[in-house]
Image (tube, rainbow, N blue to C red):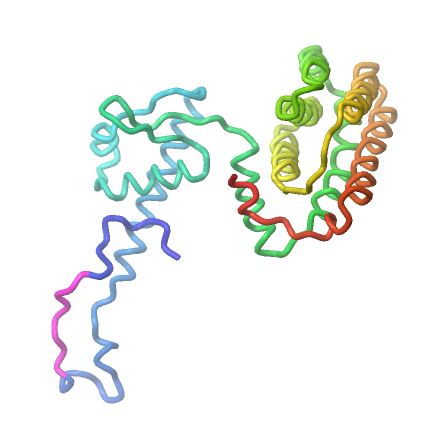
Amino acid sequence: MTIFGADEDLTAVGAPEVNAGQLSPGASPVDRLPSRRPAARRSQKAALSIAQRIVDDITDGDLDRGTKLASEREMLARFEAGRGTLRESLRFLEMNGVLTVKPGPRGGPVVSARCGEDFAQILGLFMQMRGVPFRALVSAREILEPELAALAALSATKTDDARIKDSIDGMRAFLDDDQNFLAENDRFHVAVARASGNDLFALLISSLHAITDGVPLGLTYSRSRRESVARSHTEIYDAVHARDAEGARWATRKHLRHFRSRVQADVPGAMDRPVRWRDLLT
């Protein structure tokens, strides 16, 4: 599948006629038709190169979410590219959550949030292609998160501690608000992963949580259940704050095993249900 190549008209007519007598023995007239593939590959390479340079601009300049990038006219001049190639580059970056393109005379490309939801969609796509069940997602979290909590206990800063505690306070404030409660729940787990000192783990955990939330299991969270989750998070936080690595590992493992047990009891068969990409796009 060709992602790029908007500047190339692969259906163009006008190829020169070929005289069969000019062909070498055994050759088909099709063998002598001019190939469009090299041109398509060049266009794809050019669009990808532009996309990479735009990403370099964002990261090298440490541009925040909402920062407006150069106009189309400025980019065309800078990159010396055709309008179709540039727009294909921007569409690719928009599809992957790097930026959004706002319409109108004052619109243009704007830096998006760099978060796990975008990576989750890519991960979810390949999970469906490989037939990965929900069980594998839960198992990955059970392996990763206890160790990250232990690392957090050893390396968390005061800022990390405050971020983790703030998410718990948020959960308690939203005990009667399902959507915001779940958002604070995700924020807690990502905050613990960030406190481990490895941003890659934070991105991965954020993605795994986005997929967990996206899969329609049919779980319900009563107020008492939310209070129980908040208590479990507090137990993990207390161990991290006390710099008790083994305590943080144990509390996180217990918390995730309880989640597994609840899914198995409340939604029979859910653990073996394949993750579907479309569930993450709604």
In the rendered image, which quarter is residue 187 located in? top right
Q: Nearer the viewer, residue 150 or 108?
A: 108
**Quick check: 194 left or right of 265?**
left
- SS assignment for the magenta stretch, majority: loop
Residue appearing at x 38%, y 20% in the figure? 67
Q: Is residue 41 visible in the rendered structure shown here? A: yes
Place of residue 281 in the rendered image (x, y in percent of width and height, measured from the top left):
51, 41
Q: Nearer the viewer, residue 252 or 43?
A: 252
* Residue that lies at the very extreme toward the bottom in this rendered image: 25
Number of residue marks: 0
Place of residue 103 in the rendered image (x, y in percent of width and height, measured from the top left):
29, 29
Place of residue 48 in the rendered image (x, y in percent of width and height, measured from the top left):
36, 44
Residue appearing at x 62%, y 32% in the figure? 206
Place of residue 118 in the rendered image (x, y in percent of width and height, measured from the top left):
52, 36
Q: Nearer the viewer, residue 178 or 68?
A: 178
Q: Which residues are magenta?
A: 12-19
In the rendered image, which quarter is residue 121 located in? top right
Residue appearing at x 33%, y 38% in the figure? 50
